[in-house]
Image (cartoon, helix red, strand yellow):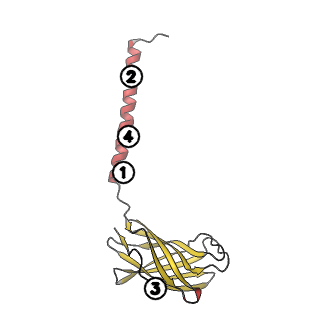
Amino acid sequence: MRLSTRSLRSTSAGRRAGLCTALGTGLAAVGVLALAPAAGAVEPQSATISFDCGTWGAGSATLTAAQNGTAATIEVSTSAITAPIDVGAGSVSSTLTLTNNGAGEVSFTGDSNPAIPAGSAVSTGPLDGTVAPGDSLEAASLTVVVFGVTATCTATSAQTPGPFVFD
């Protein structure tokens, strides 16, 4: 097969055009990402606190927070309440109440949980709430409803390493 100089030039030009198109598309995608609004950040992302749940028990809890703009979620796992029987996924209804900047209150609610085997610590969430930039939230109480039975828990320690501060 014999290639002429003209066919080599057109093949090379086609490669350059394809490379330029790919580079242009890549730069456009980077530009769009640079202009996208930030999801927001919460610090710390994880904290611990102790709860007293009366006859249900007492113990520590791990709170894990995430933020996307003014929407935020907190997941709770606490040894203060253990499941007496197997609890299916989506069977727990919870409200976590937090103080906002030491004054007002903000509630995070939800009906979501993983399956919880009998004897295991209760995990619930994500619990949904709304935040504003500068909100500084520290857990004050937790209400958990399982199969119509309510456990009300009160925080007995400060949140460590400190309150959740939202952007």
User: Which part of the image, by quadrant, shows the C terminus?
Assistant: bottom left
Q: Earlier in the sequence, mark 3 or mark 2?
A: 2
Mark 3 or 2: the one toward you: 3
Q: Earlier in the sequence, mark 1 or mark 3?
A: 1
Q: Is residue 124 left or right of residue 101?
A: right
User: Could you tell me residue 46's position as x and y percent?
Assistant: 44, 69
Residue drawn at point x = 48 percent, y = 81 percent: 50
Asked whether the beta carbons under mark 2 and mark 4 sit within 8 Å of each other, the answer is: no
Mark 2, residue position: 12
User: Counting other residues with Cα less than 10 Å from the Cα at mark 4, is it few (<14), some (14-19), or many (20 or more)?
Assistant: few
Which SS class for mark 3? loop
Mark 2–mark 1 distance (CA, rounded to whole Å): 32 Å
Mark 2–mark 4 distance (CA, rounded to whole Å): 20 Å
Asked whether the beta carbons under mark 2 and mark 1 sit within 8 Å of each other, the answer is: no
- Is the residue 109 above or below the residue 3 in the image? below
Mark 1–mark 3 distance (CA, rounded to whole Å): 44 Å
Which SS class for mark 2? helix
Amino acid carrying label 1: it is: Leu
User: Could you tell me residue 72's position as x and y percent?
Assistant: 43, 69
User: Counting other residues with Cα less than 10 Å from the Cα at mark 1, is it few (<14), some (14-19), or many (20 or more)?
Assistant: few
Residue drawn at point x = 40 percent, y = 25 percent: 14
Mark 3–mark 2 distance (CA, rounded to whole Å): 73 Å
Amino acid carrying label 2: it is: Ser
Mark 1 or 3: the one toward you: 3
Amino acid carrying label 3: it is: Thr
Mark 1–mark 4 distance (CA, rounded to whole Å): 13 Å
